[in-house]
Image (spheres, helix red, strand yellow):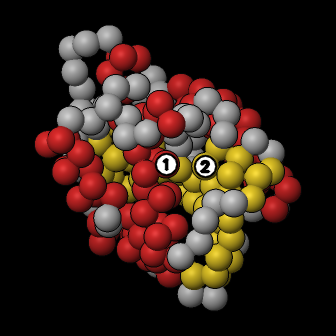
């Protein structure tokens, strides 16, 4: 069983904001598999599907970003999911907009959602897709909670469209082969 988590903030006011690229990626996957996140448990919207004979749970935590780990750990414990079988999709200010990196571990780089996940999982060794949103000289909170302009949205959507294929390969390939294929 795999757990695919997109990080973001709940509420329509956060749609198409830089901090919500994880939610956007999950939405793209849901389109491909023709499912909706219509189940609510442990402060998370989720649903399950089968990809290549593997049960996969898609999850959008419904607490604010900085409490994402509180939700994720409940899913891990309830569904008895091994940490090696989770994949977190999140924004990254250190990557240029329109780029992404797949990693199996790493620091939090000041990302409060990742800090909370690491605290709950008691490790930074979990798999992730980091989607670049670039840096800006304005206040960081205002920037990550700000909406994409049209040019940025085009670049982000190009990355988001690749995520369902990455998820298919996440189920099928070793993680090293997945990184080699996409990084």
Mark 2, other Cα within 10 Å: few <14 / some 14–19 / many ≥20 = many
Query: In front: 144, or 151?
Result: 151
Q: In this image, 168 relative to 48: left or right?
A: left
Classify the position of the N terminus by image quarter: bottom right
Q: Are marks 2 and 1 in contact (CB under 8 Å)?
A: yes
131 is higher (above) or lower (below) than 32: above
Residue on which disc 1 sits: 23
User: For the point 69% across and 60% down, which residue is it?
Assistant: 38
Q: Is residue 106 visible?
A: no
User: For the point 21% across and 14% down, which residue is it?
Assistant: 137
Mark 1, other Cα within 10 Å: few <14 / some 14–19 / many ≥20 = many
Classify the position of the C terminus by image quarter: bottom left
User: For the point 80% across and 51% down, which residue is it?
Assistant: 41
Q: Position of residue 76 (x, y in %)?
A: 76, 54
117 is higher (above) or lower (below) than 47: above
Q: Which residue appears farthest toward the bottom when viewing the image?
A: 53
Q: Position of residue 32 (x, y in %)?
A: 45, 75
Which structural element holds mark 1? helix
């Amino acid at each position: 069983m795999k757990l695919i988590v997109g990080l973001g903030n709940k509420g329509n006011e956060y749609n198409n904001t830089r901090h919500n690229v994880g939610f956007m990626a999950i939405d793209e996957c849901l389109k491909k598999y023709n499912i909706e996140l219509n189940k609510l448990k442990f402060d998370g919207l989720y649903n399950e599907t089968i990809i290549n004979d593997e049960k996969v749970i898609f999850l959008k935590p419904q607490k604010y970003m900085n409490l994402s780990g509180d939700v994720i750990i409940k899913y891990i414990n309830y569904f008895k999911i091994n940490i090696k079988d989770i994949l977190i999709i999140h924004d990254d200010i250190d990557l240029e907009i329109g780029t992404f990196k797949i990693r199996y571990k790493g620091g939090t780089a000041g990302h409060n959602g990742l800090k909370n996940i690491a605290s709950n999982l008691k490790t930074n060794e979990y798999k992730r897709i980091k989607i670049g949103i670039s840096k800006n000289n304005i206040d960081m909170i205002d920037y990550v909670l700000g909406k994409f302009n049209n040019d940025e949205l085009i670049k982000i959507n190009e990355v988001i469209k690749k995520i369902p294929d990455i998820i298919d390969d996440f189920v099928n390939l070793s993680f090293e082969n997945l990184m080699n294929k996409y990084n």
